[in-house]
Amino acid sequence: MEKLFVDLGKNSYDILISDSFNELPKALRGINAPKKLLIVTDTNVRDLYADEVHELLCSNGYDAAVYAFEAGEENKNMNSVLGICQACINHKLDRKSMIIALGGGVTGDMAGFAAAIYMRGIDFVQIPTTLLSQSDSSVGGKTGIDFAESKNILGAFHQPKLVYMNVSTLRTLPEEQFVSGMGEVIKHGIIRDSEFFEYLMNNAESIKALDSETLIKMDKRNCSIKADIVMQDEKENGLRAILNFGHTIGHAVESAYIFTKTHGECVGIGMAAAGYIAKKRGLINDAALSKIENILEMYGFKIFTKLPDKDSIYKFMQNDKKKLQGKLKFILPFEIGNVIQTADVTKEEIYEALEYIERG
Ligand code: GLY
């Protein structure tokens, strides 16, 4: 079991990384979790892990119930959140009770949001079961839902009391979802840590083979990069925006594909496109851009591909909630492990980068 501490003053918490659920009851005792718990999951993860976690908690003296909402990003909406709140009422959760989010990013974001608003805020624990949620969304306290065709447009910062990762859950993850999660892991190397980037290059075989020891090591280093950024800028007033590397174009590509491609695959395209813009500006050289492209391809990304219509991608970029005073913010690498933030990328540069992705 590996442990990281996210130091956010009174909102601090541990991230525990293991290869089973066995140490969850001890971890919950460690945070003085109340007896009454609601395990929130989706219909896919319910069938895989909810029984195991539910029985483990009940046999350790917890009064736990399970509530599952219909799986899928299309259900990341207010109705599902209200369903979770209704389950809190049915199970008689009070202000001292706790929600356990068991699942991927959609589950963590919605269960966390329900925890942020139920009785004006109750505690919650994240048990992420996908690589995307283990590598990114379970750490940092962003919770929320999609609304009016905009991703995560409604939400709240609400930090969990604990994040408990069991890397063996990655064995039941569809391959495309594993690739998608690797997008965020690779992103963390590019924006902050060239050594970690090299580690990912040199250990691709054991990572892809889901070797537990390697995955625990990877998750630990990955989460420490994210946690370090969150600790410096919890509410995204500055530094935290670098986590959006690849997302300015990536989110728009994801929307233009009408969510038929995974988040990570679109972020991979976004990272290659941002890398190309950086190269054209002389921030990085050909070799650095090739390294970014090579590592993505090594992990199964198809970054060079026919894209949806460029005008529609550009239009979706205009809805980006990260826009400040009408200007799109871009994160561009100036070496592997370092990025800059800029708001002066032009429409021409964006179109040229999209053409580059299509040309291959
Ligand atoms: N996923 C970006 C962030 O947590 O800020």
Image (cartoon, grey):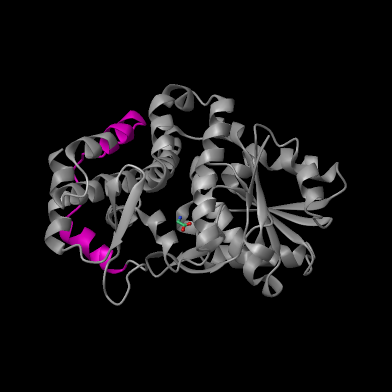
Q: Is residue 152 left or right of residue 246?
A: right
Q: In the picture, which quadrant includes the C terminus?
A: top left
Residue ID at (49%, 51%): 72
The answer to which image quadrant residue 165 occupies is top right
The answer to which image quadrant residue 310 occupies is bottom left
The answer to which image quadrant residue 201 occupies is top left
Q: Is residue 82 visible?
A: yes
Looking at the picture, tell me which residue is in the foreground, 111 or 140.
Answer: 140
Does the stretch in magenta take in 298? yes
Residue ID at (62%, 61%): 8
Q: Is residue 260 visible?
A: no
Looking at the picture, tell me which residue is in the foreground, 129 or 279.
Answer: 279
Q: Residue furthest right?
A: 61
Does the stretch in magenta take in 299? yes
Provide residue 114's location: percent of width, then percent of height: 62, 65
Q: Is residue 235 left or right of residue 91?
A: left
Q: Is residue 33 above or below residue 315?
A: above
Provide residue 46's location: percent of width, then percent of height: 64, 44
Looking at the picture, tell me which residue is in the foreground, 227 or 101.
Answer: 227
Q: Is residue 84 above or below residue 201?
A: below
Q: In the picture, which quadrant includes the N terminus?
A: top right
Looking at the picture, tell me which residue is in the foreground, 357 or 68.
Answer: 357
Q: Is residue 295 above or below residue 313?
A: above
Q: Is residue 34 left or right of residue 325?
A: right
Q: Residue furthest bottom?
A: 325
Q: Is residue 36 left or right of residue 336?
A: right
Q: Start and end of the magenta stretch? A: 292-319
- Counting every numbered tag in the picture gives 0
Provide residue 234's location: percent of width, then percent of height: 53, 64
